Amino acid sequence: MKIPHSRPILLSFGLASTALVMCALLLLEWRDGTAAVESFEWVSGSLENQRELATVEARMSEAESGERGYLLTGQPGFLAPYSVATNEIRTRLLNLRHLMADNPGQLRRLLIIDSLSRAKLTELDSAIKLERAGKHDLAVSIVRNNKSDRVMTSIRSGLQSMTADEASLLRDRQQSLVAELRRGDMISLGLAVALALMLIALLVIARGAEHYRNLVTLCAWTRSVEYEGEWISFEEYLRRKFGISSTHGISPEALSQLQVALEEPQKG
């Protein structure tokens, strides 16, 4: 009797299919992991943009307060925080231009704010220089100019509008990140299930292989045994397979049948 091959083939096919599914899930895991990293970077970028915008707005107010404090009191102590604020404004605006290079809309608005900020800082410097030169009334007249207030209002309004847009973008990116993480969890679960199926398939194959390994093919007519592609006697099979030598006898059942066979001709 030939050992049936259909079951091992099916098991092998199932194992191969499970492996392919695992490879596909691993590919999806890698792709979604990459997307999650990008979403996380977007979230971090949006948060940094908001911090930079808020810092620029705060430093503009500090610079203006330092200038007006100096004009009102004439105390040079107001100029130290003024210098720090103006230097940081320039640095933060330059950093924002790099951070928003991938967002044309925000970048255009930033360039407008940058231009207004430069004009405002030039105005503040002019007033301070006039105060230092003893031209107090002329310096104060610059501060009282309505144009000065309009420029500052435009800067604050632009910064706040950009911050609001960044907050909206941040919400969208956070939702995208959450979706990517959830999808990653589902894929991880799929990988775990695929791995479990593969282990079960391996166990079934191992048991099936053990079962087939213990089968012996006997000829139904000659009682010879198929062993390593050769048909040999049962005695030879015992010797080769197990190292057992055999002898011959006759069983009581066979002896009875032989006696019956010998008695039948005499009765005839």
Image (cartoon, rainbow, N blue to C red):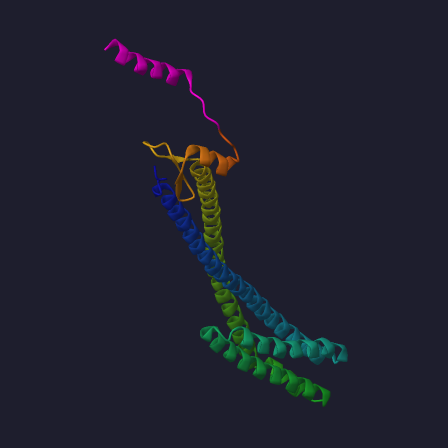
Q: For residue 264, which quarter of the picture? A: top left
- Residue 236 visible: yes
Q: Along the horizontal axis of the image, is 95 left or right of 21?
A: right
- Residue 75 visible: no
Residue 33 percent across, percent down from the top left: 50, 59
Q: Along the horizontal axis of the image, is 124 left or right of 5?
A: right
Q: Is residue 105 above or below residue 142?
A: above
Q: Is residue 258 above or below residue 131?
A: above
Write the start and end of the magenta stretch as one range: 247-268
Looking at this rendering, what residue extends furthest in the left direction? 268
Residue 262 in magenta stretch? yes
Q: Which quarter shows the N terminus?
A: top left
Q: For residue 48, which quarter of the picture? A: bottom right
Residue at the spot x=37%, y=14% of the render?
A: 256
Using the image as rendered, state which of residue 201 and residue 171 is in the foreground.
201
Residue 139 percent across, percent down from the top left: 65, 85
Instruction: Please identify the dominant SS of the magenta region.
Output: helix
Q: Along the horizontal axis of the image, is 258 left or right of 78?
A: left
Using the image as rendered, state which of residue 122 and residue 241 is in the foreground.
241
Residue 55 percent across, percent down from the top left: 61, 70
Q: Is residue 55 above or below residue 222?
A: below
Q: Which quarter shows the C terminus?
A: top left
Using the image as rendered, state which of residue 223 and residue 248 is in the foreground.
248
Using the image as rendered, state which of residue 22 and residue 262 is in the foreground.
262
Residue 263 in magenta stretch? yes
Residue at the spot x=51%, y=35% of the render?
A: 242
What count of labels does the image hold? 0
Residue 66 percent across, percent down from the top left: 69, 76
Residue at the spot x=42%, y=33% of the render?
A: 234
